[in-house]
Image: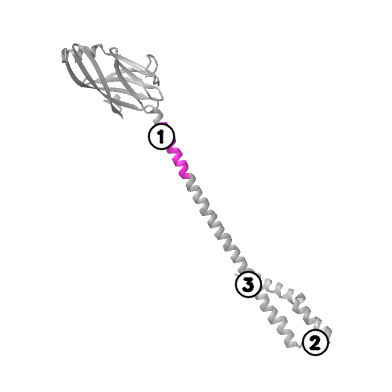
Amino acid sequence: MLGELWRFIVGVIGYWQAYASGGVVTAIIALGERVTGRSLPKAAYLSVFLVVYLLVAFFLVWRDEYRGALAARKDVVALTESNAEIATRLNHAEGQVRDLATRLASAYSASYTPSLDLVYAEKQFRFYNRGKTNLYFWGTRLADDRPAIESEARVITPSGGGFIGEGFFYIPGDQFEQRERSRLGQDGEERVPLEAFVATEDSKRYRIRYVLRVVMAGGAVTVHSQNMGMKEFDWSSN
């Protein structure tokens, strides 16, 4: 408070001194007295130099403070707008980062999602890895039989070509055909569920379900497979 009052007094004295010692009005009064040889009455002199100049000094000090307040207000408004713009840009950038992270996570997850086609040909159950990374084939379950889980997984490399040894793993189907002949005889048809147990490079385990449409015609076996979907499933604990 005292500091502000002192600054005000110093400002008033500064402006008053400037006008009293070198202002235009002071110069006109001095010139008039010198030309006319007459002195300004003391009352008028005091009115001009004390009252008028002090009022002018008060106004000029107030004007300086007012202009300073306006400038500060403009700075605050500009800073507020700048902060709002920065916040908007940050929010937009955060949204882009979240979107990129979501896309990367989705791409990462998709790269490990298993895609295993089953084809029965030449008395073989052929499993084709259509995915992007290696699949680890652990075993199968046919119909209501107990799961047949191997002690060591078979690696199926990714490939869409279907050539033996390239993205391809097979299980002999001789016993399966004998089983179907004993059930269907020379002619008949049935649907048999088959499950495959696989693991991916990111150590997730899946159960992939198929339905085998078995057609027996004159003792000849034809098998058509249909993929019924997959589910993340810890078959090692079942």
CA gap, disc 3 to disc 1?
65 Å
25 in relation to 78, above or below: below
Q: In the rendered image, is residue 147 in sight?
A: no
Q: Secondary structure at mark 2?
A: loop
> What's the residue type where badge 1 is placed?
Ser
Q: Position of residue 76 (x, y in %)?
A: 56, 60
Name the mark on residue 106.
Answer: 1
Q: In the rendered image, is residue 181 in sight?
A: yes
Query: Where is the N terminus found, in terms of image quarters?
Result: bottom right
Categorize mark 2 by other alpha carbons within 10 Å: few (<14), some (14-19), many (20+): few
CA gap, disc 1 to disc 2?
96 Å
Q: Choose top left, top right, bottom left or bottom right for residue 173.
A: top left
What residue appears at the point 80 percent right and 87 percent down from the top-left corner?
39
Q: Which residue is mark 3?
A: 62
43 in relation to 10, above or below: below
Does the magenta segment cover residue 43?
no
Q: Earlier in the sequence, mark 1 or mark 2?
A: 2
What residue appears at the point 68 percent right and 78 percent down from the top-left corner?
54
Name the mark on residue 7.
Answer: none
46 in relation to 106, above or below: below
Q: Which residues are magenta?
A: 94-109
Which mark is in front, 1 or 2?
A: 1
Q: Earlier in the sequence, mark 3 or mark 1?
A: 3
Q: Which residue is mark 2?
A: 39
> What's the residue type where badge 3 is placed?
Trp
Residue sitting at the far front: 218
Q: Secondary structure at mark 1?
A: helix
Q: Choose top left, top right, bottom left or bottom right for residue 140.
A: top left
Categorize mark 3 by other alpha carbons within 10 Å: few (<14), some (14-19), many (20+): some
